[in-house]
Amino acid sequence: MLRFEVLGPLRVWRGQSELDLGFPQQRALLALLLVRVGRPVPLGEIVEALWSGWPPASAANAVRRYAGSLRRLLEPELPPRTPGQRVLRRGGGYLLNAGNSEVDLLRFRELVGRGNRLAAAGRPDSAVREFADALSQWRGPVAQGVREAVRAHPRFTGVEREIVRATATAAELALRHGGTAQILPSIRKAVALAPLNESLHARLVLSLAAGGAQTEALAAYETARHRLAAELGTVPGAELSAAHTRVLRRQVPRTRPSATPYRVPAQLPPDLAVFTGRAAELATLTAAADDAEDAAGVAATVVIGGAPGVDKSTLAVRWAHQAAARFPDGRLHVELGGFAPARHPLDPAEALRGMLVSLGVPHRGLPDTAEALTGLYRKLMAGRRALVVLDDAAGSDQVRRLLPATPGCLVLVTSRLDLSPLVSRGARPLRLHAPPAREAEHVLARRIGAERVAAEPAAVREIAARCGYLPLALAAIAARAAARPHFPLAALAGELRAGDGLDAFPAGVRTAFQRSYRALPPEHARLFRLLSRHPGPDPWITPTSAAALTGLPVLDLSARLGALSSVHLLTEDEPARYTLHPLLRSFAAELADEDGADW
Protein backbone atom coordinates (compact mmCIF):
# COMPACT_ATOMS: atom_id res chain seq x y z
CA MET A 1 0.00 0.00 0.00
CA LEU A 2 1.20 3.52 -0.79
CA ARG A 3 0.94 6.48 1.56
CA PHE A 4 1.14 10.04 0.21
CA GLU A 5 1.88 13.13 2.31
CA VAL A 6 1.54 16.67 0.93
CA LEU A 7 0.35 18.64 4.00
CA GLY A 8 3.95 19.33 4.95
CA PRO A 9 7.06 17.77 3.42
CA LEU A 10 6.20 15.99 0.16
CA ARG A 11 6.71 12.28 0.89
CA VAL A 12 5.55 8.90 -0.41
CA TRP A 13 5.84 5.59 1.42
CA ARG A 14 5.49 2.03 0.25
CA GLY A 15 4.91 0.08 3.43
CA GLN A 16 7.72 1.19 5.76
CA SER A 17 10.03 2.37 2.96
CA GLU A 18 10.12 6.00 1.87
CA LEU A 19 10.46 6.51 -1.87
CA ASP A 20 12.97 8.83 -3.50
CA LEU A 21 10.80 11.16 -5.59
CA GLY A 22 13.47 12.15 -8.06
CA PHE A 23 14.30 15.46 -9.67
CA PRO A 24 12.69 18.78 -8.63
CA GLN A 25 10.33 19.03 -11.61
CA GLN A 26 9.18 15.45 -11.15
CA ARG A 27 8.50 16.16 -7.46
CA ALA A 28 6.60 19.28 -8.45
CA LEU A 29 4.37 17.31 -10.83
CA LEU A 30 3.58 14.77 -8.10
CA ALA A 31 2.73 17.57 -5.66
CA LEU A 32 0.39 19.20 -8.17
CA LEU A 33 -1.36 15.89 -8.86
CA LEU A 34 -1.68 15.30 -5.11
CA VAL A 35 -3.41 18.58 -4.34
CA ARG A 36 -5.89 17.66 -7.10
CA VAL A 37 -5.91 13.94 -6.26
CA GLY A 38 -8.68 12.05 -8.04
CA ARG A 39 -9.25 14.85 -10.55
CA PRO A 40 -7.41 15.47 -13.84
CA VAL A 41 -4.96 18.36 -14.06
CA PRO A 42 -4.82 19.77 -17.62
CA LEU A 43 -1.43 19.68 -19.35
CA GLY A 44 -1.47 23.47 -19.78
CA GLU A 45 -1.91 23.98 -16.04
CA ILE A 46 0.93 21.57 -15.28
CA VAL A 47 3.25 23.40 -17.66
CA GLU A 48 2.30 26.77 -16.18
CA ALA A 49 2.89 25.54 -12.62
CA LEU A 50 6.19 23.78 -13.28
CA TRP A 51 7.77 26.59 -15.31
CA SER A 52 6.03 29.61 -13.71
CA GLY A 53 4.73 30.88 -17.04
CA TRP A 54 8.07 30.57 -18.92
CA PRO A 55 8.03 27.02 -20.31
CA PRO A 56 10.64 25.67 -22.74
CA ALA A 57 9.52 24.43 -26.13
CA SER A 58 9.97 20.85 -24.90
CA ALA A 59 7.75 21.32 -21.81
CA ALA A 60 4.98 18.94 -22.92
CA ASN A 61 7.48 16.17 -23.67
CA ALA A 62 9.19 16.78 -20.33
CA VAL A 63 5.87 16.43 -18.50
CA ARG A 64 5.26 13.12 -20.27
CA ARG A 65 8.69 11.89 -19.14
CA TYR A 66 8.05 12.97 -15.55
CA ALA A 67 4.65 11.26 -15.58
CA GLY A 68 6.25 8.07 -16.91
CA SER A 69 8.91 8.18 -14.21
CA LEU A 70 6.27 8.66 -11.52
CA ARG A 71 4.27 5.76 -12.95
CA ARG A 72 7.34 3.49 -12.71
CA LEU A 73 8.14 4.76 -9.21
CA LEU A 74 4.65 4.12 -7.86
CA GLU A 75 4.17 0.81 -9.71
CA PRO A 76 7.67 -0.68 -10.11
CA GLU A 77 6.40 -4.04 -11.32
CA LEU A 78 4.42 -2.47 -14.16
CA PRO A 79 5.44 -3.82 -17.61
CA PRO A 80 6.83 -1.24 -20.06
CA ARG A 81 4.30 0.93 -21.93
CA THR A 82 1.48 -0.17 -19.63
CA PRO A 83 -0.74 2.65 -18.27
CA GLY A 84 -1.08 1.25 -14.76
CA GLN A 85 -3.54 2.32 -12.08
CA ARG A 86 -1.90 5.32 -10.40
CA VAL A 87 -0.82 8.06 -12.84
CA LEU A 88 -3.44 8.15 -15.58
CA ARG A 89 -3.96 10.20 -18.76
CA ARG A 90 -7.31 11.96 -18.40
CA GLY A 91 -8.96 14.99 -19.96
CA GLY A 92 -5.92 16.20 -21.84
CA GLY A 93 -3.80 16.00 -18.70
CA TYR A 94 -2.93 13.64 -15.84
CA LEU A 95 -4.70 12.28 -12.79
CA LEU A 96 -3.33 10.66 -9.64
CA ASN A 97 -5.54 7.82 -8.43
CA ALA A 98 -5.43 7.26 -4.65
CA GLY A 99 -7.89 6.58 -1.85
CA ASN A 100 -8.79 8.54 1.28
CA SER A 101 -6.71 6.26 3.48
CA GLU A 102 -3.63 6.82 1.31
CA VAL A 103 -3.48 10.64 1.12
CA ASP A 104 -3.20 12.98 4.10
CA LEU A 105 -5.10 15.76 2.27
CA LEU A 106 -8.08 13.46 1.67
CA ARG A 107 -8.04 12.31 5.31
CA PHE A 108 -7.91 15.98 6.37
CA ARG A 109 -10.95 16.83 4.26
CA GLU A 110 -12.86 13.79 5.47
CA LEU A 111 -12.25 14.70 9.13
CA VAL A 112 -13.13 18.37 8.58
CA GLY A 113 -16.40 17.31 6.95
CA ARG A 114 -17.16 15.05 9.88
CA GLY A 115 -16.39 17.89 12.31
CA ASN A 116 -18.74 20.26 10.49
CA ARG A 117 -21.53 17.68 10.56
CA LEU A 118 -21.07 17.06 14.29
CA ALA A 119 -21.10 20.79 15.00
CA ALA A 120 -24.34 21.17 13.01
CA ALA A 121 -25.82 18.26 14.97
CA GLY A 122 -25.16 20.00 18.28
CA ARG A 123 -22.16 17.88 19.33
CA PRO A 124 -19.39 20.52 19.65
CA ASP A 125 -17.05 18.49 21.88
CA SER A 126 -16.93 15.67 19.34
CA ALA A 127 -16.60 18.21 16.53
CA VAL A 128 -13.53 19.77 18.16
CA ARG A 129 -11.91 16.33 18.42
CA GLU A 130 -12.53 15.68 14.71
CA PHE A 131 -11.05 19.06 13.79
CA ALA A 132 -8.03 18.39 16.02
CA ASP A 133 -7.48 15.04 14.29
CA ALA A 134 -7.84 16.73 10.91
CA LEU A 135 -5.30 19.43 11.77
CA SER A 136 -2.87 16.81 13.07
CA GLN A 137 -2.46 15.77 9.41
CA TRP A 138 -0.90 19.20 8.76
CA ARG A 139 2.84 19.08 9.47
CA GLY A 140 4.19 22.20 7.75
CA PRO A 141 4.07 24.24 4.53
CA VAL A 142 2.07 22.45 1.85
CA ALA A 143 4.35 20.47 -0.49
CA GLN A 144 7.45 21.46 1.45
CA GLY A 145 10.57 20.56 -0.53
CA VAL A 146 9.05 21.68 -3.84
CA ARG A 147 10.43 24.93 -5.29
CA GLU A 148 8.85 28.09 -3.89
CA ALA A 149 7.97 29.31 -7.39
CA VAL A 150 5.86 26.18 -7.91
CA ARG A 151 4.29 26.33 -4.45
CA ALA A 152 3.09 29.87 -5.23
CA HIS A 153 0.65 28.36 -7.78
CA PRO A 154 -3.03 28.83 -6.80
CA ARG A 155 -3.54 25.08 -6.35
CA PHE A 156 -1.15 25.07 -3.40
CA THR A 157 -2.20 28.39 -1.90
CA GLY A 158 -5.79 27.20 -2.17
CA VAL A 159 -5.01 24.21 0.06
CA GLU A 160 -3.34 26.54 2.56
CA ARG A 161 -6.48 28.72 2.65
CA GLU A 162 -8.51 25.56 3.24
CA ILE A 163 -6.33 24.75 6.26
CA VAL A 164 -6.63 28.28 7.62
CA ARG A 165 -10.45 28.14 7.34
CA ALA A 166 -10.59 24.80 9.15
CA THR A 167 -8.33 26.13 11.90
CA ALA A 168 -10.49 29.24 12.36
CA THR A 169 -13.64 27.12 12.57
CA ALA A 170 -12.05 24.73 15.06
CA ALA A 171 -10.76 27.60 17.20
CA GLU A 172 -14.20 29.23 17.32
CA LEU A 173 -15.84 25.96 18.37
CA ALA A 174 -13.18 25.36 21.02
CA LEU A 175 -13.54 28.87 22.45
CA ARG A 176 -17.31 28.46 22.78
CA HIS A 177 -17.40 24.92 24.07
CA GLY A 178 -13.96 24.12 25.54
CA GLY A 179 -10.91 22.36 24.17
CA THR A 180 -8.76 25.34 23.16
CA ALA A 181 -5.55 23.56 24.23
CA GLN A 182 -6.38 20.85 21.71
CA ILE A 183 -6.44 23.39 18.87
CA LEU A 184 -3.85 25.92 20.08
CA PRO A 185 -0.78 24.42 18.31
CA SER A 186 -2.66 24.54 14.99
CA ILE A 187 -3.75 28.14 15.59
CA ARG A 188 -0.10 29.13 16.07
CA LYS A 189 0.86 27.43 12.80
CA ALA A 190 -2.05 28.99 10.95
CA VAL A 191 -1.09 32.48 12.17
CA ALA A 192 2.41 31.89 10.81
CA LEU A 193 0.87 30.80 7.50
CA ALA A 194 -1.53 33.79 7.30
CA PRO A 195 0.21 36.50 9.36
CA LEU A 196 -2.18 39.29 8.30
CA ASN A 197 -5.39 37.39 9.10
CA GLU A 198 -6.87 39.39 12.00
CA SER A 199 -9.55 36.78 12.81
CA LEU A 200 -6.85 34.17 13.36
CA HIS A 201 -4.85 36.54 15.55
CA ALA A 202 -7.99 37.23 17.60
CA ARG A 203 -8.58 33.51 18.10
CA LEU A 204 -4.94 33.01 19.12
CA VAL A 205 -5.17 35.80 21.70
CA LEU A 206 -8.40 34.39 23.17
CA SER A 207 -7.18 30.77 23.12
CA LEU A 208 -4.01 31.68 24.99
CA ALA A 209 -6.05 33.52 27.61
CA ALA A 210 -8.47 30.59 27.90
CA GLY A 211 -5.50 28.38 28.73
CA GLY A 212 -4.31 30.74 31.46
CA ALA A 213 -1.48 32.31 29.44
CA GLN A 214 -2.57 35.92 30.04
CA THR A 215 0.85 37.47 29.45
CA GLU A 216 1.43 35.49 26.28
CA ALA A 217 -2.04 36.46 25.01
CA LEU A 218 -1.24 40.16 25.41
CA ALA A 219 2.14 39.65 23.74
CA ALA A 220 0.42 37.91 20.80
CA TYR A 221 -1.84 40.94 20.38
CA GLU A 222 1.18 43.28 20.36
CA THR A 223 2.90 41.12 17.75
CA ALA A 224 -0.18 41.31 15.52
CA ARG A 225 -0.54 45.07 16.03
CA HIS A 226 3.08 45.75 15.06
CA ARG A 227 2.83 43.51 11.99
CA LEU A 228 -0.34 45.22 10.75
CA ALA A 229 1.28 48.61 11.19
CA ALA A 230 4.53 47.62 9.50
CA GLU A 231 3.09 45.75 6.52
CA LEU A 232 -0.31 47.39 5.92
CA GLY A 233 -0.06 50.69 7.75
CA THR A 234 -3.28 49.92 9.65
CA VAL A 235 -4.40 49.40 13.24
CA PRO A 236 -6.24 46.32 14.55
CA GLY A 237 -9.86 46.06 13.49
CA ALA A 238 -12.92 45.51 15.63
CA GLU A 239 -12.56 41.74 16.14
CA LEU A 240 -8.93 41.78 17.21
CA SER A 241 -9.42 44.89 19.36
CA ALA A 242 -12.39 43.27 21.09
CA ALA A 243 -10.32 40.14 21.83
CA HIS A 244 -7.61 42.35 23.36
CA THR A 245 -10.15 44.14 25.53
CA ARG A 246 -11.62 40.86 26.80
CA VAL A 247 -8.18 39.67 27.81
CA LEU A 248 -7.38 42.95 29.60
CA ARG A 249 -10.67 42.72 31.51
CA ARG A 250 -10.13 39.00 32.23
CA GLN A 251 -13.44 38.13 30.56
CA VAL A 252 -12.19 34.98 28.82
CA PRO A 253 -13.41 31.77 30.54
CA ARG A 254 -10.60 29.44 31.54
CA THR A 255 -10.45 25.94 30.04
CA ARG A 256 -10.35 23.29 32.73
CA PRO A 257 -7.47 20.80 32.39
CA SER A 258 -8.50 17.24 31.71
CA ALA A 259 -7.11 13.98 32.99
CA THR A 260 -4.50 12.14 30.93
CA PRO A 261 -5.19 8.38 31.19
CA TYR A 262 -2.51 6.02 29.93
CA ARG A 263 -3.30 4.12 26.74
CA VAL A 264 -1.19 1.11 25.79
CA PRO A 265 0.36 1.82 22.35
CA ALA A 266 0.96 -0.89 19.74
CA GLN A 267 2.78 0.92 16.95
CA LEU A 268 5.30 -1.55 15.57
CA PRO A 269 5.50 -1.77 11.77
CA PRO A 270 4.78 -5.18 10.22
CA ASP A 271 7.48 -7.79 10.70
CA LEU A 272 9.43 -8.99 7.65
CA ALA A 273 8.25 -12.51 6.83
CA VAL A 274 11.49 -13.46 5.05
CA PHE A 275 13.86 -12.35 7.84
CA THR A 276 16.66 -14.82 8.51
CA GLY A 277 19.91 -14.95 10.46
CA ARG A 278 21.29 -12.28 12.83
CA ALA A 279 21.13 -14.70 15.78
CA ALA A 280 24.01 -13.04 17.65
CA GLU A 281 22.55 -9.56 17.22
CA LEU A 282 19.09 -10.71 18.36
CA ALA A 283 20.71 -12.25 21.44
CA THR A 284 22.41 -8.93 22.21
CA LEU A 285 19.06 -7.18 22.19
CA THR A 286 17.58 -9.86 24.44
CA ALA A 287 20.44 -9.30 26.90
CA ALA A 288 19.70 -5.59 26.84
CA ALA A 289 16.06 -6.32 27.64
CA ASP A 290 17.19 -8.41 30.59
CA ASP A 291 19.24 -5.44 31.75
CA ALA A 292 16.20 -3.20 31.41
CA GLU A 293 14.26 -5.42 33.79
CA ASP A 294 17.07 -5.31 36.35
CA ALA A 295 18.17 -1.68 35.81
CA ALA A 296 18.37 0.70 38.72
CA GLY A 297 17.50 4.30 37.94
CA VAL A 298 17.54 4.56 34.13
CA ALA A 299 15.95 3.06 31.03
CA ALA A 300 18.20 0.75 29.04
CA THR A 301 19.14 2.01 25.55
CA VAL A 302 20.69 0.23 22.57
CA VAL A 303 22.09 2.18 19.61
CA ILE A 304 21.90 0.00 16.48
CA GLY A 305 24.35 1.47 13.96
CA GLY A 306 25.69 0.46 10.60
CA ALA A 307 26.13 1.33 6.95
CA PRO A 308 23.19 2.25 4.72
CA GLY A 309 21.26 -0.85 3.69
CA VAL A 310 22.56 -3.14 6.43
CA ASP A 311 19.02 -3.69 7.83
CA LYS A 312 19.20 -1.80 11.11
CA SER A 313 15.48 -1.03 11.14
CA THR A 314 14.51 -4.54 10.08
CA LEU A 315 16.52 -6.05 12.94
CA ALA A 316 14.93 -3.70 15.49
CA VAL A 317 11.40 -4.45 14.29
CA ARG A 318 12.00 -8.24 14.13
CA TRP A 319 13.28 -8.36 17.71
CA ALA A 320 10.53 -6.02 18.92
CA HIS A 321 7.86 -8.40 17.61
CA GLN A 322 9.61 -11.39 19.16
CA ALA A 323 9.89 -9.64 22.54
CA ALA A 324 6.51 -7.88 22.59
CA ALA A 325 5.27 -9.90 25.57
CA ARG A 326 8.11 -8.47 27.69
CA PHE A 327 6.55 -5.01 27.42
CA PRO A 328 2.96 -5.13 28.67
CA ASP A 329 2.74 -1.31 28.73
CA GLY A 330 3.14 -1.07 24.98
CA ARG A 331 5.45 -0.55 22.04
CA LEU A 332 6.08 2.93 20.61
CA HIS A 333 7.65 3.39 17.18
CA VAL A 334 8.82 6.79 15.89
CA GLU A 335 10.25 7.50 12.43
CA LEU A 336 12.78 10.27 13.11
CA GLY A 337 13.62 10.85 9.44
CA GLY A 338 17.32 11.51 10.05
CA PHE A 339 18.31 10.56 6.51
CA ALA A 340 14.95 10.64 4.75
CA PRO A 341 14.95 12.20 1.26
CA ALA A 342 13.84 15.84 0.96
CA ARG A 343 12.72 16.03 4.54
CA HIS A 344 14.12 17.65 7.65
CA PRO A 345 14.68 15.34 10.62
CA LEU A 346 11.66 15.20 12.93
CA ASP A 347 11.82 17.88 15.62
CA PRO A 348 11.99 16.28 19.12
CA ALA A 349 9.02 18.34 20.31
CA GLU A 350 6.93 17.14 17.36
CA ALA A 351 8.00 13.56 18.07
CA LEU A 352 6.96 13.96 21.71
CA ARG A 353 3.55 15.28 20.70
CA GLY A 354 2.95 12.22 18.58
CA MET A 355 4.17 9.88 21.30
CA LEU A 356 1.99 11.52 23.96
CA VAL A 357 -1.11 11.27 21.79
CA SER A 358 -0.31 7.59 21.27
CA LEU A 359 -0.07 7.22 25.06
CA GLY A 360 -3.57 8.61 25.51
CA VAL A 361 -3.00 12.34 26.01
CA PRO A 362 -5.66 14.27 24.06
CA HIS A 363 -4.48 17.00 21.73
CA ARG A 364 -6.01 19.61 24.01
CA GLY A 365 -3.83 18.36 26.89
CA LEU A 366 -0.48 18.78 25.14
CA PRO A 367 1.87 21.38 26.63
CA ASP A 368 3.39 24.08 24.43
CA THR A 369 7.09 23.87 25.26
CA ALA A 370 9.60 21.10 24.61
CA GLU A 371 10.53 21.03 28.30
CA ALA A 372 6.92 20.54 29.38
CA LEU A 373 6.36 17.88 26.73
CA THR A 374 9.44 15.99 27.95
CA GLY A 375 8.29 16.21 31.55
CA LEU A 376 4.82 14.89 30.77
CA TYR A 377 6.23 12.06 28.65
CA ARG A 378 8.62 10.93 31.36
CA LYS A 379 5.90 11.19 33.99
CA LEU A 380 3.64 8.94 31.93
CA MET A 381 6.44 6.42 31.31
CA ALA A 382 7.50 6.27 34.97
CA GLY A 383 7.07 2.77 36.36
CA ARG A 384 6.10 1.33 32.98
CA ARG A 385 7.56 -1.59 31.08
CA ALA A 386 7.43 -0.35 27.52
CA LEU A 387 9.55 -0.58 24.39
CA VAL A 388 10.44 2.56 22.42
CA VAL A 389 11.86 2.16 18.90
CA LEU A 390 13.41 5.38 17.55
CA ASP A 391 14.19 4.75 13.89
CA ASP A 392 16.72 6.64 11.73
CA ALA A 393 18.08 9.15 14.22
CA ALA A 394 19.89 12.23 12.92
CA GLY A 395 21.95 12.65 16.09
CA SER A 396 22.01 12.37 19.87
CA ASP A 397 20.30 15.72 20.40
CA GLN A 398 17.26 14.52 18.47
CA VAL A 399 16.96 11.48 20.72
CA ARG A 400 17.69 12.73 24.27
CA ARG A 401 14.23 14.08 25.08
CA LEU A 402 12.63 10.88 23.81
CA LEU A 403 14.34 8.65 26.38
CA PRO A 404 12.32 7.60 29.43
CA ALA A 405 14.02 8.53 32.71
CA THR A 406 13.11 5.48 34.78
CA PRO A 407 14.00 1.76 34.65
CA GLY A 408 11.80 -0.91 33.11
CA CYS A 409 11.70 0.54 29.61
CA LEU A 410 13.99 -0.37 26.72
CA VAL A 411 14.83 2.04 23.91
CA LEU A 412 16.17 0.86 20.53
CA VAL A 413 17.71 3.64 18.45
CA THR A 414 18.72 3.00 14.84
CA SER A 415 21.05 5.40 13.09
CA ARG A 416 23.71 5.72 10.41
CA LEU A 417 25.75 7.61 13.01
CA ASP A 418 27.61 6.27 16.03
CA LEU A 419 25.70 8.51 18.50
CA SER A 420 28.74 8.50 20.76
CA PRO A 421 27.21 10.98 23.25
CA LEU A 422 24.46 8.47 24.00
CA VAL A 423 26.97 5.65 24.34
CA SER A 424 29.07 7.73 26.73
CA ARG A 425 25.94 8.13 28.90
CA GLY A 426 25.43 4.37 29.13
CA ALA A 427 23.72 3.29 25.91
CA ARG A 428 24.86 -0.05 24.54
CA PRO A 429 26.24 0.11 20.96
CA LEU A 430 25.35 -2.64 18.48
CA ARG A 431 27.14 -2.14 15.18
CA LEU A 432 25.79 -4.17 12.26
CA HIS A 433 27.95 -5.40 9.40
CA ALA A 434 26.99 -7.23 6.24
CA PRO A 435 26.20 -10.84 7.17
CA PRO A 436 28.59 -13.68 6.30
CA ALA A 437 28.34 -15.38 2.93
CA ARG A 438 26.32 -18.37 4.11
CA GLU A 439 23.76 -16.18 5.84
CA ALA A 440 23.47 -13.95 2.78
CA GLU A 441 22.72 -17.02 0.66
CA HIS A 442 20.00 -17.99 3.13
CA VAL A 443 18.50 -14.51 2.67
CA LEU A 444 18.29 -15.14 -1.07
CA ALA A 445 16.78 -18.57 -0.49
CA ARG A 446 14.02 -17.16 1.72
CA ARG A 447 13.16 -14.52 -0.87
CA ILE A 448 13.57 -16.48 -4.11
CA GLY A 449 12.69 -19.98 -2.99
CA ALA A 450 14.84 -22.83 -1.67
CA GLU A 451 14.32 -25.08 -4.70
CA ARG A 452 15.44 -22.46 -7.17
CA VAL A 453 18.49 -21.61 -5.08
CA ALA A 454 19.42 -25.27 -4.63
CA ALA A 455 19.27 -25.78 -8.40
CA GLU A 456 21.94 -23.12 -9.10
CA PRO A 457 24.24 -22.89 -6.04
CA ALA A 458 27.17 -21.38 -7.96
CA ALA A 459 25.00 -18.57 -9.33
CA VAL A 460 23.61 -17.88 -5.86
CA ARG A 461 27.11 -17.64 -4.41
CA GLU A 462 28.13 -15.22 -7.16
CA ILE A 463 25.01 -13.06 -6.72
CA ALA A 464 25.56 -12.83 -2.96
CA ALA A 465 29.23 -11.95 -3.43
CA ARG A 466 28.53 -9.28 -6.07
CA CYS A 467 25.98 -7.76 -3.67
CA GLY A 468 28.77 -7.53 -1.11
CA TYR A 469 26.38 -9.52 1.13
CA LEU A 470 24.62 -6.21 1.86
CA PRO A 471 20.96 -6.91 2.81
CA LEU A 472 19.57 -3.96 0.82
CA ALA A 473 21.32 -5.10 -2.35
CA LEU A 474 20.36 -8.74 -1.73
CA ALA A 475 16.70 -7.77 -1.31
CA ALA A 476 16.74 -5.66 -4.47
CA ILE A 477 18.27 -8.41 -6.61
CA ALA A 478 16.04 -11.05 -5.04
CA ALA A 479 13.00 -8.96 -5.99
CA ARG A 480 14.25 -8.83 -9.57
CA ALA A 481 14.69 -12.62 -9.58
CA ALA A 482 11.26 -13.21 -8.04
CA ALA A 483 9.65 -11.02 -10.71
CA ARG A 484 11.23 -13.22 -13.42
CA PRO A 485 10.65 -16.74 -12.07
CA HIS A 486 11.49 -18.47 -15.37
CA PHE A 487 14.87 -16.77 -15.81
CA PRO A 488 17.93 -18.78 -14.71
CA LEU A 489 19.80 -17.28 -11.78
CA ALA A 490 23.00 -17.62 -13.80
CA ALA A 491 21.62 -14.97 -16.17
CA LEU A 492 21.05 -12.63 -13.24
CA ALA A 493 24.59 -13.28 -12.00
CA GLY A 494 25.81 -12.50 -15.50
CA GLU A 495 23.98 -9.16 -15.48
CA LEU A 496 25.71 -8.23 -12.23
CA ARG A 497 29.06 -9.40 -13.59
CA ALA A 498 28.69 -7.33 -16.74
CA GLY A 499 27.21 -4.29 -15.00
CA ASP A 500 29.09 -1.03 -14.55
CA GLY A 501 29.36 -0.40 -10.80
CA LEU A 502 25.99 0.33 -9.21
CA ASP A 503 24.23 0.54 -12.57
CA ALA A 504 23.54 -3.17 -12.29
CA PHE A 505 21.45 -2.57 -9.15
CA PRO A 506 18.05 -0.90 -8.71
CA ALA A 507 18.20 2.84 -8.01
CA GLY A 508 17.31 2.37 -4.35
CA VAL A 509 20.80 1.08 -3.54
CA ARG A 510 22.50 4.20 -4.89
CA THR A 511 19.89 6.40 -3.23
CA ALA A 512 20.58 4.86 0.18
CA PHE A 513 24.27 5.69 -0.17
CA GLN A 514 23.57 9.21 -1.43
CA ARG A 515 21.64 10.09 1.72
CA SER A 516 24.69 9.40 3.88
CA TYR A 517 27.13 11.01 1.48
CA ARG A 518 25.16 14.26 1.24
CA ALA A 519 25.39 14.70 5.01
CA LEU A 520 29.23 14.73 4.94
CA PRO A 521 31.17 17.97 5.33
CA PRO A 522 33.13 18.84 2.15
CA GLU A 523 36.54 17.67 3.36
CA HIS A 524 35.17 14.27 4.42
CA ALA A 525 33.22 13.93 1.17
CA ARG A 526 36.38 14.56 -0.87
CA LEU A 527 38.30 11.95 1.10
CA PHE A 528 35.50 9.41 0.61
CA ARG A 529 35.61 9.96 -3.16
CA LEU A 530 39.38 9.54 -3.30
CA LEU A 531 39.36 6.35 -1.24
CA SER A 532 37.81 4.56 -4.22
CA ARG A 533 41.26 4.83 -5.80
CA HIS A 534 43.10 3.30 -2.86
CA PRO A 535 45.63 0.89 -4.40
CA GLY A 536 45.87 -2.84 -3.63
CA PRO A 537 46.84 -5.50 -2.89
CA ASP A 538 46.71 -4.59 0.83
CA PRO A 539 43.00 -4.27 1.69
CA TRP A 540 43.63 -1.99 4.66
CA ILE A 541 43.16 1.75 4.41
CA THR A 542 45.39 3.42 7.00
CA PRO A 543 46.18 7.06 7.75
CA THR A 544 49.59 6.51 6.15
CA SER A 545 48.24 5.00 2.93
CA ALA A 546 45.52 7.65 2.74
CA ALA A 547 48.19 10.34 3.17
CA ALA A 548 50.11 8.89 0.23
CA LEU A 549 46.91 9.00 -1.82
CA THR A 550 45.84 12.54 -0.89
CA GLY A 551 49.03 14.38 0.08
CA LEU A 552 47.44 15.44 3.39
CA PRO A 553 49.14 15.09 6.80
CA VAL A 554 48.74 11.72 8.51
CA LEU A 555 47.28 13.39 11.61
CA ASP A 556 44.51 15.02 9.54
CA LEU A 557 43.77 11.72 7.82
CA SER A 558 43.45 9.91 11.16
CA ALA A 559 40.66 12.25 12.19
CA ARG A 560 38.90 12.15 8.81
CA LEU A 561 39.04 8.38 8.50
CA GLY A 562 37.60 8.13 12.00
CA ALA A 563 34.81 10.50 11.02
CA LEU A 564 33.92 8.37 7.97
CA SER A 565 33.88 5.31 10.19
CA SER A 566 31.59 7.06 12.68
CA VAL A 567 28.99 7.51 9.92
CA HIS A 568 29.53 3.92 8.77
CA LEU A 569 30.91 4.71 5.33
CA LEU A 570 34.12 2.95 6.37
CA THR A 571 34.57 -0.05 8.64
CA GLU A 572 37.35 0.05 11.25
CA ASP A 573 38.23 -3.65 11.50
CA GLU A 574 41.29 -3.04 13.67
CA PRO A 575 42.61 0.13 15.31
CA ALA A 576 43.40 2.65 12.53
CA ARG A 577 42.81 -0.02 9.84
CA TYR A 578 39.77 0.51 7.68
CA THR A 579 37.98 -1.20 4.81
CA LEU A 580 35.53 0.14 2.25
CA HIS A 581 32.55 -2.05 1.34
CA PRO A 582 32.67 -3.03 -2.37
CA LEU A 583 29.39 -1.34 -3.24
CA LEU A 584 30.38 1.80 -1.35
CA ARG A 585 33.69 1.71 -3.26
CA SER A 586 31.74 1.61 -6.53
CA PHE A 587 29.63 4.53 -5.35
CA ALA A 588 32.72 6.52 -4.35
CA ALA A 589 34.29 5.77 -7.72
CA GLU A 590 31.22 7.15 -9.53
CA LEU A 591 31.47 10.33 -7.50
CA ALA A 592 35.20 10.63 -8.12
CA ASP A 593 34.71 10.26 -11.87
CA GLU A 594 32.06 12.97 -11.86
CA ASP A 595 34.09 15.31 -9.70
CA GLY A 596 37.62 14.70 -10.92
CA ALA A 597 38.60 14.02 -7.29
CA ASP A 598 40.93 17.01 -7.14
CA TRP A 599 41.87 18.58 -3.82
Image (spheres, helix red, strand yellow):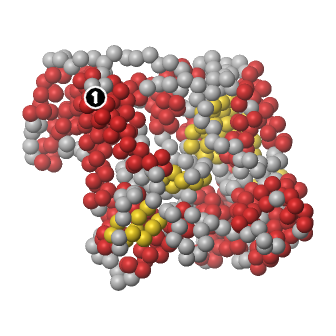
* Near-viewer residue (582 or 210): 210
Horizontal and vertical percent for residue 529? Answer: 65, 68
In this picture, is 296 found above or below 29? above
Residue 549 position, x and y percent, is 72, 71
Residue 245, image x, y percentages: 13, 24
Q: Secondary structure under badge 1?
A: loop
| Residue annotated with mark 1 | 121
Residue 415 vs 34, above or below: the answer is above
Q: Residue at x 63, y 23 (%)?
A: 329
Q: Could you tell whether 113 is left or right of 200 in the image?
A: right
Q: Is residue 80 visible?
A: yes
Name the foreground residue: 596 vs 263.
263
Q: Residue at x 41, y 38 (%)?
A: 136
Q: Quadrant of residue 182?
A: top left
Where residue 596 appears, x then y in whole percent? 61, 77
Which residue is farthest bottom?
Answer: 57
Residue 510 visible? The answer is no
Nearer-the-camera pick, 12 or 36:
36
Q: Is residue 132 left or right of residue 77?
A: left
Nearest to the observer: residue 66 or residue 405: 66
The amino acid on which the numbered mark 1 sits, given as a three-letter code, is Ala
* Position of the C terminus by quadrant: bottom right
Q: Residues within 10 Å of mark 1 (few under 14, many from 20)?
A: few
Q: Residue at x 63, y 27 (%)?
A: 330
Up the image or down, 255 lies above or below 310; here it is: above
Above or below residue 510? Residue 228 is above
